[in-house]
Image: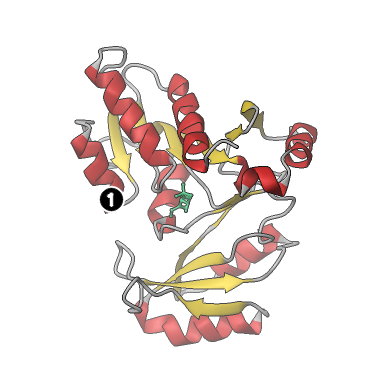
Amino acid sequence: MIPTEVLKEQAALAALKFVKNGDTIGLGTGSTVKYAIDGLGNNLKNGTLSDIKAISTSLSSEARAKDNKIPTTSFDETVKLDVYIDGADEVDQALRLIKGGGGALLREKIVAQNSALKIIIVDASKLSERVGEKWHLPVEVFPLALGAELNFLKSLDAVARVRTDDKGEPFITDNGNFIIDANFGRIHKARKMAKMLDARAGIAGHGLFIDLCDILIVAYPNGVMHIRKGEKETFKNLLDSVSPAQTF
Ligand code: 5RP
C-alpha cells in the first residue's frame, strides 16, 4: 500500500507542469499543497522555472513560500492570477469541493475566484459521490455573530460545533474569526445551500466551493489522473476502483 503522504506529493508535483515562466500563482493551504510550494521552490532553484510571483492563502503557506524564496505579489498589483493550486477535504463527481479543514477557506475562495486556472490536488481518499458524505462543512463566522450563526446552522438540521484548537480553545482564523464545523451529511442541493450561507451577514465565508475547480488531479495507488469538469464517468470509475482499504 502506498502511504498517503506519497500520494499527496505525487498529486502536488503533477500540478507543477501547469505553471509557466512569468506566471502569478495562488498558493493554497494544507499538507498536500505544501509539496507543490516546495516543488515550485525547487524549480526556481534549479532554473527550470523563473519570474513567478505568488499570493498565499494563509500565514503558514506564506511562510513556506518565503522559505522557498518564492516572490510574492498582491491583488493591488495583480488583478487576476494565472494558476491556483490547492488541496481539498472532499471532492464529488461535479467537482464540487468542501474546503477549510485547515481553516483557510475564506482566503482560499478569494484567491480561487480570482485565478484563471484552478487546479485541485488530492489523494483518492478525498473522493466521494456527493459532498458532505465524508466531511463536515466549515463555516467561518464573525465573532459577534457566533451564537446566532450556530443557531442558524442547527436550524438547518446540521450537527454544528465551534472548532477548537489543540488546547481546547476556540480556533481563530487568520482573519480573526471563528469556525463552525457543520455536519449536514450528504449535501443534496449544494448550490442552494451555498446561496443560503452567502446571504447571512454573520457568515464571513464557507467551505462549499462550486465551479471553482477546472482540473482535479488525483493520486491513487495505480497512478495519477487528471479529471476535468463534466468527466463524471471518469470520476465515477476512479471512485469505484479505489476501495476503502486502499485509500484510508
Ligand atoms: C485548508 C484547506 C485544505 O486544502 C484542505 O483542508 C485539505 O488539506 P490537506 O491537503 O492537508 O488534506 O481547505 O483550509
Residue 12 vertical placement versus 185 (above, below)? above
Residue 173 vertical placement versus 200 (above, below)? above
Q: Amino acid at mark 1?
A: Ser
Residue 52, horizontal then vertical, whole percent: 28, 24
Residue 114, horizontal then vertical, whole percent: 43, 41
Image quadrant where one finds the N terminus: top right
The scheme the figure's colours follow is secondary structure
Residue at 31% across, 44% down? 56
Beta carbon of the mark 1 residue lies under 8 A of ligand 1:
no
Residue 4, horizontal then vertical, whole percent: 52, 42
Residue at 49% across, 86% down? 148
Residue 208, horizontal then vertical, whole percent: 57, 57
Q: Nearer the viewer, residue 132 or 196?
A: 132
Q: Which residue is mark 1?
A: 60
Labels in figure, total:
1
Is 86 situated left or right of 159 in this image? left
Is 236 situated left or right of 192 in this image? right
Q: Nearer the viewer, residue 222 or 231?
A: 222
Q: Is residue 177 visible?
A: yes
Residue at 41% across, 57% down? 102
Q: Is residue 95 visible?
A: no
Helix, strand or loop at mark 1: helix
Specify the farthest residue to the front: 1
Residue 78 vertical placement versus 195 (above, below)? above
Residue 150 vertical placement versus 97 (above, below)? below
The picture quadrant where one finds residue 13 is top left
Dot 1: within a 10 Å radius of its alpha carbon, few (fewer than 14), some, or many (20 or more) residues? Answer: some
